[in-house]
């Protein structure tokens, strides 16, 4: 289409995405469309003139042509070399491959994590079944809460404490009395012998 305007060197057309192409094939369209393209004219002046004259004009001249409703979007790239295009395409390809690799590794990580969790739960279920079959009870933590004592319970506790204190005091008094009685007899013997002399 552009060879009418001047001598063309190299041409590169970027085909549309694979997903879009598959969708179009399913709907019945067999043609391959392109999203963008680069054309190299042999003469720089011709390229500038073509870019200025064709930009934003209809591609097809007749209504029956399939490009009749499409418009040209042409831009002259100053100091652009063909190596820049190949470098850019190579860079885009490597970025795409890197993105695919990271997505695949992420999916692998997620599936491995899921499988590990499934295996762990299966192992824990097996252990639980073995314990139950061996009549071992799994320790379950019982939560026990103490309530505040009622007034009666507090009074009973105080009475018990008083009773135990008085009982201890009585026992101490009895012990002291027994010791003093044994000492009294000893003292009597000692002092009575002194009086007799």
Image (tube, grey):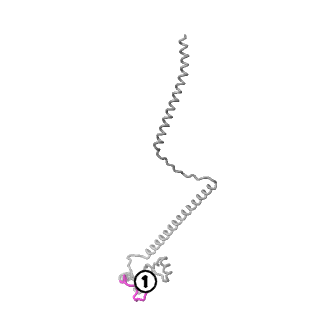
Q: Residue at x 49, y 76 (%)?
A: 19
The quadrant in which residue 35 appears is bottom left
Q: Residues within 10 Å of mark 1 (few under 14, many from 20)?
A: some
Q: Nearer the viewer, residue 190 or 8?
A: 190
Q: Nearer the viewer, residue 175 or 60?
A: 175
Q: Main secondary structure of the magenta part?
A: loop
Q: Is residue 4 above or below residue 112?
A: below
Residue 45 visible in the displayed image: no
Left or right of 45 in this view: 16: right
Image quadrant occupied by the C terminus: top right
Image quadrant occupied by the N terminus: bottom left
Task: Report x, y in % for residue 144.
Answer: 51, 49
Q: Residue at x 56, y 62 (%)?
A: 118
What is the magenta range? 53-68
Give the labeled residue for mark 1.
Answer: 8
Q: Residue at x 57, y 60 (%)?
A: 121
Numbered disc 1: secondary structure: strand
Task: Report x, y in % for residue 6.
Answer: 40, 85
Q: Residue at x 48, y 71 (%)?
A: 96
Extreme-front residue of the structure: 152
Let me know if residue 56 is in the magenta part: yes
Task: Report x, y in % for residue 85.
Answer: 44, 75
* Label tally: 1
């Amino acid at each position: 289409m552009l060879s009418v305007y001047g001598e063309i060197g190299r041409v590169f057309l970027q085909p549309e995405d694979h997903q879009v192409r598959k969708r179009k094939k399913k709907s019945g369209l067999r043609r391959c469309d392109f999203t963008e393209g680069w054309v190299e004219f042999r003469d720089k002046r011709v390229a500038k003139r073509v870019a200025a004259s064709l930009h934003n004009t209809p591609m097809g001249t007749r209504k029956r042509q399939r490009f009749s409703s499409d418009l040209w979007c042409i831009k002259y790239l100053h100091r652009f070399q063909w190596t820049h295009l190949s470098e850019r395409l190579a860079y885009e390809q490597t970025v795409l491959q890197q993105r695919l690799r990271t997505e695949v590794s992420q999916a692998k990580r997620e599936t491995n994590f899921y499988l590990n969790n499934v295996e762990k739960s299966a192992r824990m279920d097996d252990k639980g079944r073995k314990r139950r079959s061996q009549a071992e009870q799994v320790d379950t933590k019982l939560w026990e809460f103490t309530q505040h004592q009622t007034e009666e319970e507090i009074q009973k506790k105080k009475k018990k404490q008083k009773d135990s204190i008085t009982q201890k005091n009585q026992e101490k008094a009895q012990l002291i009395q027994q010791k003093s009685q044994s000492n009294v007899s000893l003292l009597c013997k000692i002092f009575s012998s002194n009086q007799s002399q």
